[in-house]
Image (cartoon, helix red, strand yellow):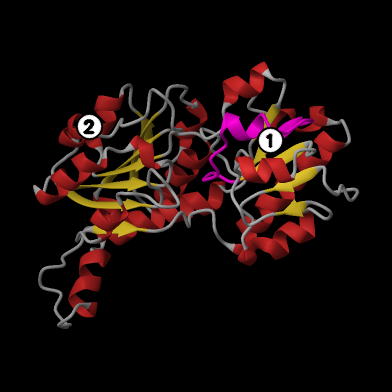
Amino acid sequence: MGEDVPGRVVSTSVFGHEERFARAHLPGTCLLEDSLSSQVARAHADARVLTVMIHDHVEVEALEVFRALEGIVTRSDGFDHLPLRWMRENGVRGYHLGGYATESVAHHALMFMLMLLRRVPEAGGVVGGMSPVWDRSSLMGRHLEDVTVGVLGVGRIGSKVASLVSGLGGRVVGFDIDPDPRLEVLEGFRFVSSLDALLERSDVLSLHVPLDSSTRGLIGDEALAMLPEGACLVNTARGGIVDHDAVVEALWADRLGGYATDVLPGEPTPPDLERLAGLERVVVTPHLAAYDERTVDARYARTARIVDALVTGEGGSVENLRVV
């Protein structure tokens, strides 16, 4: 940021392990470990700009306390946690960090695929369980080049996943409401014309769609039943896209070969965590896909760019990152 702006910018959910990045890029900003709440709002009612995280409960009740709020920047790609209608009606601009973590999330998705195909979750149970044994007899895996990876949502991250799998010799099919024909040049990649066609062909299904009314619970009983028997499901998008009751049932019935997710509904205290973490053929990570030093630094650098534009009245320079 070009100048210190004490009191005018408040950043919530800045935890100790990220503070060095925040201080480097957001000098003068009020950094709080607390998530956004009415109590936080009352203590900082003069703030002009808020920066929040994906798990902040950005409630209208808290926002109404601020007397001069001009903008909210979510330090995430997703923005389904922002009350867009209220912001629009009250002239509060909203921004996200679109594309800041594309490579990191794509790498995490690829890691998940390989872990499930190579039976790593079950291997951990055999070698690292209560009675460890050196036995691979029940752990025959599958080769990436022998399966078809389905990518649901072929935007920035989905297209990067497709490129990575293609580069490793894998076959990829993709479905998107606005397909980019330029991706057809990828070796082994093609678009299909419907979600059903994608599901029917996906030995591994990787999710890369936003969470909204059309995608909430999209991967449930019906969708899982359309996957080939023993297919694997990978989710680095949003927890609410998946019906976890249906996933658990499909795992118990051996219709689903494995599930790997970095996201769950209700973060940071997701109710499904204990149930899923105790299952074989499941990998759960605590929203790590965009959590490496390079990407966290990029998160705060891009946040600072947006905040600086808002504070200096040059919001037009970051219009491509505006969501409301």
Mark 1 lies on residue: 72
**Secondary structure of the residue carrying numbered label 2:** helix
With respect to residue 219, does 305 lie above or below? Answer: below
Query: Residue at 56% across / 33% down in the picture?
Result: 59
Q: How many neighbours does mark 1 have within 10 angstroms: few (below 14), some (14-19), or many (20 or more)?
A: many
Indicate the amino acid at tag 1.
Answer: Ile
- Residue 278 visible in image: yes
Picture coordinates of residue 109 (x, y %)?
A: 41, 51
Mark 2 lies on residue: 223
Q: Is residue 42 left or right of residue 128?
A: right
Residue found at the very far right of the displayed protein: 3
**For the residues carrying marks 2 and 1, which lies nearer the camera in this image?**
1
Query: Residue at 31% across / 59% down in the picture?
Result: 283
Q: Is residue 104 left or right of residue 270?
A: right
Q: Which residues are magenta?
A: 53-72
The dominant secondary structure in magenta is loop
With respect to residue 306, does 281 lie above or below? Answer: below
